[in-house]
Image (cartoon, grey):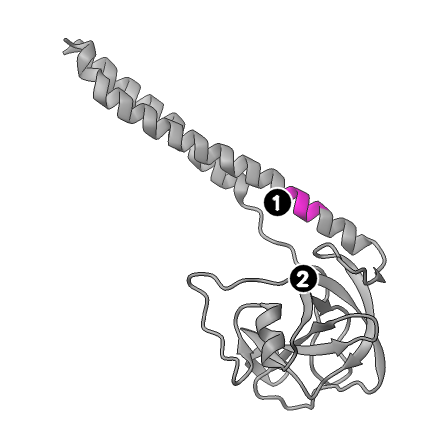
């Protein structure tokens, strides 16, 4: 009778153990996936920019030539930064780049404060921009609501932003400009490629640690139950 007392607790413990081991293994897989992305970003950052291909890989450093439509712009996100005038809330400035050899590209020119003490730097005529390719996003369940009327967006959705700016079709990605800011002016472009966080090793250790703890606790309980 004593071994039968372990049947249901043992099945529950085995199920929980399988779940914990599965979560740990999933985090290990995510770790390798994230390491691959970080390696890809490191290679792209070390390499020179290439002429924008038709289907660029995410985070590739590229150059694109066209005409910036500064008269058409949208805002993306919300970020607080320290400026010479003090702490300021601002957004990323999204401007279309119209090309002769392809669809317009939505360009993230950089961060601008909502209240600007200096004018935004405008570029006349053809310009060659250098930056990296950022994939378009889709709104999540908890994403903030975009406002196409005021052209204020919180999801970097190329199709939605392009439609708000009057384009029937735009490239399915963004060009994030990199480089130093224009003297005494905004926008403030990116300095380097993004580096996503990689905490998957600590998550895997946590899940595997819980699995080990479960085995130890169940073993101690089972020994006591069998001795009674």
Q: Quadrant of residue 108?
A: bottom right
Q: Position of residue 46 (x, y in %)?
A: 81, 53
The secondary structure type at the circle numbered 1 is: helix
Residue shown at the point (52%, 84%) measured from the top left: 149
Q: Position of residue 117 (x, y in %)?
A: 64, 91
Q: Which residue matches tag 1?
A: 34
Residue shown at the point (23%, 17%) measured from the top left: 7
Mark earlier in primary sequence (2, 1)? 1
Q: Quadrant of residue 10?
A: top left
Q: Position of residue 39 (x, y in %)?
A: 71, 45
Is residue 14 left or right of 50 when viewed as pictured? left
Q: Would you call the spot at circle 2 few (<14 residues within 10 Å), some (14-19), or many (20 or more)?
A: many
Q: Would you call the spot at circle 1 few (<14 residues within 10 Å), some (14-19), or many (20 or more)?
A: some
Alpha carbon separation for disc pair 2 and 1 = 16 Å
Which residue range is magenta in the image? 34-39
The secondary structure type at the circle numbered 2 is: strand
Q: Is residue 124 above or below residue 62?
A: below
Residue shown at the point (50%, 32%) measured from the top left: 25
Is residue 51 left or right of 89 when viewed as pictured? right
Q: Which mark is residue 106?
A: none
Q: Which residue matches tag 2?
A: 134
Q: Quadrant of residue 227?
A: top left
Is 56 contained in the magenta span?
no
Q: Is residue 118 above or below residue 199?
A: below
Q: Identify the main secondary structure in magenta.
A: helix
């Amino acid at each position: 009778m004593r071994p039968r007392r372990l049947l249901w607790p043992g099945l529950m413990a085995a199920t929980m153990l399988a779940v914990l081991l599965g979560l740990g293994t999933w985090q290990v897989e995510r770790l390798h996936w994230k390491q691959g992305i970080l390696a890809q970003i490191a290679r792209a950052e070390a390499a020179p920019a290439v002429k924008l291909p038709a289907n660029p890989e995410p985070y590739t450093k590229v150059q694109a030539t066209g005409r910036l439509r500064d008269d058409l712009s949208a805002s993306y996100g919300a970020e607080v930064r320290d400026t010479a005038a003090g702490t300021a809330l601002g957004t990323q400035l999204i401007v279309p780049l119209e090309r002769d050899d392809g669809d317009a590209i939505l360009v993230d020119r950089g961060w601008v404060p909502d209240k600007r003490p200096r004018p935004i730097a405008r570029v006349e005529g053809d310009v060659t921009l250098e930056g990296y390719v950022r994939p378009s996003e889709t709104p999540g369940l908890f994403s903030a609501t975009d406002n196409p009327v005021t052209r204020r967006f919180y999801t970097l959705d190329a199709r939605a932003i392009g439609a708000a700016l009057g384009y029937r079709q735009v490239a399915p990605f963004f060009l994030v400009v990199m480089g130093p800011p224009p003297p005494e002016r905004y926008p403030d472009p990116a300095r380097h490629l993004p580096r996503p966080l990689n905490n998957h090793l600590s998550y895997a250790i946590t899940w595997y640690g819980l699995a080990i703890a479960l085995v130890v606790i169940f073993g101690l309980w089972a020994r006591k139950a069998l001795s009674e």
